[in-house]
Amino acid sequence: MTADVKILDGHMHLLTAETEREELAWLPPMSPAVAAAAGRRRERYEREQAIPSAAPGGEAADAAAARWLAELDRSGIAAAVFLALAPKPETLRRFVTAAPERLFAFTFVHPWEPGAAATLEADIRQGGFRGLKLYPSIQRFHVHDERAYPVYGRAEALGIPIVFHFGVTLDYRSDLRYSNPLDLHAVARDFPALNLIVAHAGAGFFRETLFLAYHCANVHVDTSGSGTWMRYLQRPLTLQEALRRLLDVFGPDRILFGTDSRHASEGYRHWLLQAQREALEALEVPEEARRRILGGTMARLLKIPW
């Protein structure tokens, strides 16, 4: 049974008042009209997803860690990766120190800025981070831009994975011109030892994500998120159909389980875990393959015992 498989959630976020301040310190400001439009879009999303609207919790990093560890315990999750959403993610760094054997963090840098590669190395070697998160549509860069190559080279030398958010996103500041996963092809080609992860199965750019698997053995994909993007394809997909296609093209060794859990008011997205478990069982995925998808492959990328 999939319920007996050890779980490592490979895609979560820490959202507190402190992390919100860190994000606002670097995000471009919105005009009142744009902010109002962003608020309406968020309200629509929350209605569709039945997510209560709530401000990030005001808890300190250690209190947030205690809460999330309890949430993980309730859902039978052995460990989780939390992805930063802003440079200098000090709150997240403090958060994972509460349980370094269960909580893992990916840092965040602007790859085109001077000194970005050195900042990344310091975050990994001194800060305790285990990987890098990049958000092209928010950071407004094409990932094939060779100004980012020093960061990719340093990540490859450090042996850490990079997660990329392509496709649609809830953040109203996003720019879809930078959201095509095919931008990653040149990076995967030029850095063959660098493990690259396309979050949310491309979040709408599903076909493009599958094309990457054909060309690049070092590209992985994660299953995180609500899957809202599946409604907008030429032929809407079910979760089971999407997983079947990912298994057919990527194989179980390059698929990483995740939920994108992040809201304190929402808690751990245990229903997404259950849905993915049921889909894998319906597809009759062998137990060993399920073990890799639900935790083993991410543990291998992080070089942790599993």
Image: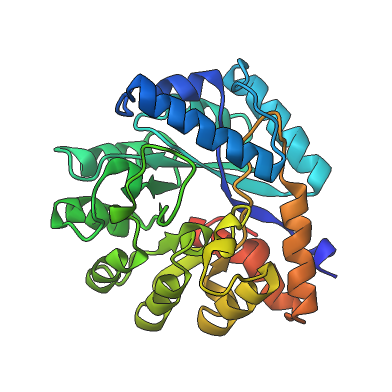
**Quarter where residue 218 is shown:** bottom left
Q: Decide which of 20, 291 is in the foreground and name it.
A: 20
Q: Percent from the top left, x then y, of residue 117?
A: 22, 44
Q: Percent from the top left, x then y, of residue 28?
A: 29, 28
Quarter of the figure that contains the C terminus: bottom right
Q: Can residue 134 be seen in the rendering of this structure?
A: yes
Residue placed at 28% from the left, 54% from the top?
177
Q: How is the image coloured?
A: rainbow
Residue placed at 61% from the left, 72% from the top?
242
Q: Percent from the top left, x then y, of residue 160?
A: 39, 55
Q: Percent from the top left, x then y, of residue 246?
A: 56, 76
Q: Can residue 101 be seen in the rendering of this structure?
A: no
Q: Is residue 74 left or right of residue 168?
A: right
| Vertical placement of residue 137 versus 288, above or below | above
| Vertical placement of residue 130 versus 195, above or below | above
Residue placed at 71% from the left, 35% from the top?
266
| Vertical placement of residue 291 versus 129, above or below | below
Q: Decide which of 235, 84 is in the foreground and name it.
A: 235
Residue placed at 67% from the left, 76% from the top?
289
